[in-house]
Image (spheres, coloured by chain):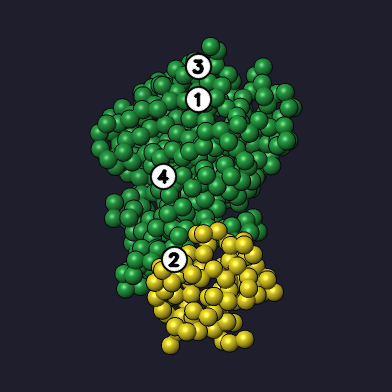
Chain colours: A yellow, B green
Amino acid sequence: MSEIAERVKQIIVEKLGVEESEVTTEASFTNDLGADSLDTVELIMEFEKEFNISIPDDQAENIGTVGQAVTYLEENVK
Amino acid sequence: MSFKRVVITGIGALTPVGNDAPTFWKNLVAGVSGAAPITRFDAERFRTRFACEIKGLDINDYIPRQEARKMDPFTQYAVIATDEAMKDAGFDTDKLDLDKAGVIWGSGIGGLKTFEDEVMNYSEGGRNPRFNPFFIPKMIADSASGVLSIRYGFRGPTFITVSACASATNALIDAYYYIRLGVMKVCISGGSEAAVTNAGVGGFNALKALSERNDSPETASRPYDKDRDGFVLGEGGAALILEEYEHAKARGAKIYAEMIGAGMSSDAYHITAPHPDGIGAFNVMKNALEDAGIQPEEIDYINTHGTSTPIGDPQEIKAIERFFGDHAFKMNISSTKSMTGHLLGGAGAIEAAACIMAIQDQVIPPTINHFTDDPEINPRLNLTFNTSQKREVKVALSNTFGFGGHNASVIFRKLED
């Protein structure tokens, strides 16, 4: 697991109060991890803060799973 | 249509002198001060560096972390106090008509810390307009009533009352009216505040409303003392379960007291200063007694607004003397803010609780920190200085006055069939 993936996982565990084992690559924030739409917006904000980047809204809309978040961040974090 | 009778069947409190109702009451009767140096934020540069904070509280002992982080502290306090009150009331929730159960809460400000944190974050983050999605739902004052409604499934009227330091009393009054009218059978009511923040202390400091007795926090709140220099900010709140009398009797509920009257008035004078002639204070007591249909001589105890400000204290006392005449010297009067500090929109709730417990235990909690008589305060009045006093208490009145000139009073009586 990449360092980015590990940090993403920790944020999700912290914000959504889920077990680490639940945070799989395929896990959907809303369908699998109990997030509502507001939680998801908050997660995106946490990723922005943690990785010091700005995720445009149209990109943020495509981040619905753990894997999608990791992929986006790996491609965009310098 | 005849009015329904309203009784109190549950009490919960989370205060600077106790994190549950029994501890709160025990410490009030013992004359314990809740004031201490501020720990909520770094107050080093503030003119006032102490407050009456809640002590030894781990929110997560009461509310799971994931839920708690979506609530401003004032809502967390509302939940903790209400959980205690609901447990105390002992409802069999399966038998409760949830459409006839409401929540009317009071808060003077709402989510001040949430607002402050988000705006600071915005400012420090290069003004990037990314706000937390929970910012608004956490900050708005009605979030407390919303969260409580969801928590207990209460589907009757639920809302918040805002009248500064009279907020919780206005909440109790609305709950009382709606039960009286038959709109509700049961109502969670009370109020909470969490204003010990940079902006809360700084804002009240700017008004020169707070005591600046930093070298002796525990003696700073001294209502009616000649050397009082302002109020001490407090935080927390209390929840009361108001219930229609027949409903309570039918389920065999423990009944603390009956709520028999409510009064409201306004000064129509100044946005922060009370009317110098105490017109509003006089009228609110008059209105409450008229509503209760009782004579002035029946009041045994007044829990005053008495915040320990130079201007506010004497005008209320003079209104009491003027309204009650000779009886003013026969009743007990005290300001429990001498111990709890001023909980702003939560004050009316903890003080109503104090009135009810005074009726329950037949003892008057004191006005602590009395050192020097004030020539403006008539020494013939029994202000219950420094130690609690045992006496027969059948009827108790609680006064609260808010910035804006809002005055609200409520009256409780020992239950008589």
- Residue topped by disc 2: B41
- Report the front residue among B242 and B394: B242
Q: Position of residue B276 (x, y in %)?
A: 27, 33
Rendered position, B156 above or below B202: above
- State whether discs 1 and 2 lie on one chain: yes
Picture quadrant where residue B282 is located: top left
Picture quadrant where residue B50 is located: bottom left
- Report the front residue among B300 and B245: B245
Helix or strand or loop: what does disc 4 sit on? loop
Q: Name the residue: 54% across, 68% down.
A: A64
Kindly report which numbered mark, 4 or 3, lies closer to the viewer in this rendering.
4
On residue B177, the disc is: 1
Question: How far is disc 3 from disc 1 in space, using C-alphas?
Answer: 18 Å
Which of pointers 2 and 4 lies earlier in the amino acid sequence? 2
Question: How far is disc 3 from disc 2 in space, using C-alphas?
Answer: 47 Å
Which of pointers 3 and 2 lies earlier in the amino acid sequence? 2
Q: Name the residue: 55% across, 16% down.
A: B3
Helix or strand or loop: what does disc 2 sit on? loop
Q: Name the residue: 64% across, 46% down.
A: B83
Badge 1: chain ID: B
Badge 3: chain ID: B
Badge 2: chain ID: B
